[in-house]
Image (cartoon, rainbow, N blue to C red):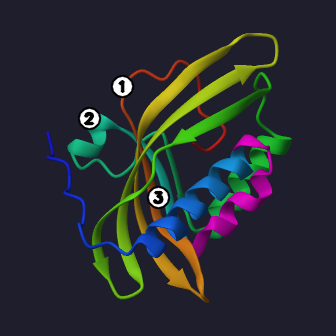
Amino acid sequence: MTPPLPAMTDADPALIRRIDALNRAYAHAIDEDALEEWPGFFTETGIYRIATRANHAAGMPVGLMLCEGHGMMEDRIKALREANVFEPHRYRHLIDPPTVTTARPGRWTVRTNFAVFRTMQMAQTALFCTGRYLDVVVEAAAELRYAERTAVCDSEVIDTLIVIPL
């Protein structure tokens, strides 16, 4: 098992607030079904993946979902809206404050714990997934964007196909 990265003790509180705002806006867009906004949280060539803890620890780069660049992300949302057949459901994210683990000018690696609850159209709300985001956040035109976002799921068992990004 990979040991956790230590937090930077000298991380700028203003930077932490900006990263936290990015994380919360990202979750809000997903939770409110504004999925067309999702690619805009990434750089043009940004990478998004979902992996299980074991696969991530083993260095396996492809997991439950992989999107490289805005084009793949936009295709994912278009397929979700027009082609995929699944029971309608919504997510609700709970997100910890971010922890900056390394910093270079204009580029930070960040770890953030999350819990996602899922509400199916005709069912009760249930805890769907817990895990951590492992991000590379960059400054792009005075805005923070994800260059990489990996959602590492704690459980090896996902009870349904993940259609909506975490």
State the count of labels.
3
At mark 3, the secondary structure is: strand
* 149 lies left or right of 56: right
Local packing at callout 3 (Cα closer than 10 Å; few below 14, some 14-19, many 20+) is many
Type of amino acid under label 1? Glu
Residues tagged 3 and 2 counted as in contact (Cβ below 8 A)? no
Observer-nearest residue: 20 or 132?
20
Circle number at residue 146: none
x and y, in percent, of residue 22 in the image: 59, 63
The residue shown at (45%, 65%) is 148
Residue 45: percent from left, percent from top: 54, 75
Name the outermost residue toward the front. 13
Residue 156: give its label.
1
Q: Which mark is residue 149?
A: 3
Residues at marks 1 and 2 touching, judged by CB atoms closer than 8 Å = yes
Q: What residue is pinned by disc 2?
A: 54
Q: Image quadrant for the N terminus? A: top left
Q: Residue 40, image x and y in percent?
A: 68, 68
Q: Amino acid at mark 3?
A: Arg
Residue 44: in magenta span: yes
As drawn, which residue projects farthest toward the top?
123
Of the pair 112 and 89, the residue shown nearer to us:
112
- Residue 152 vs residue 31, the one in the foreground: 31
Q: Secondary structure at mark 2?
A: helix
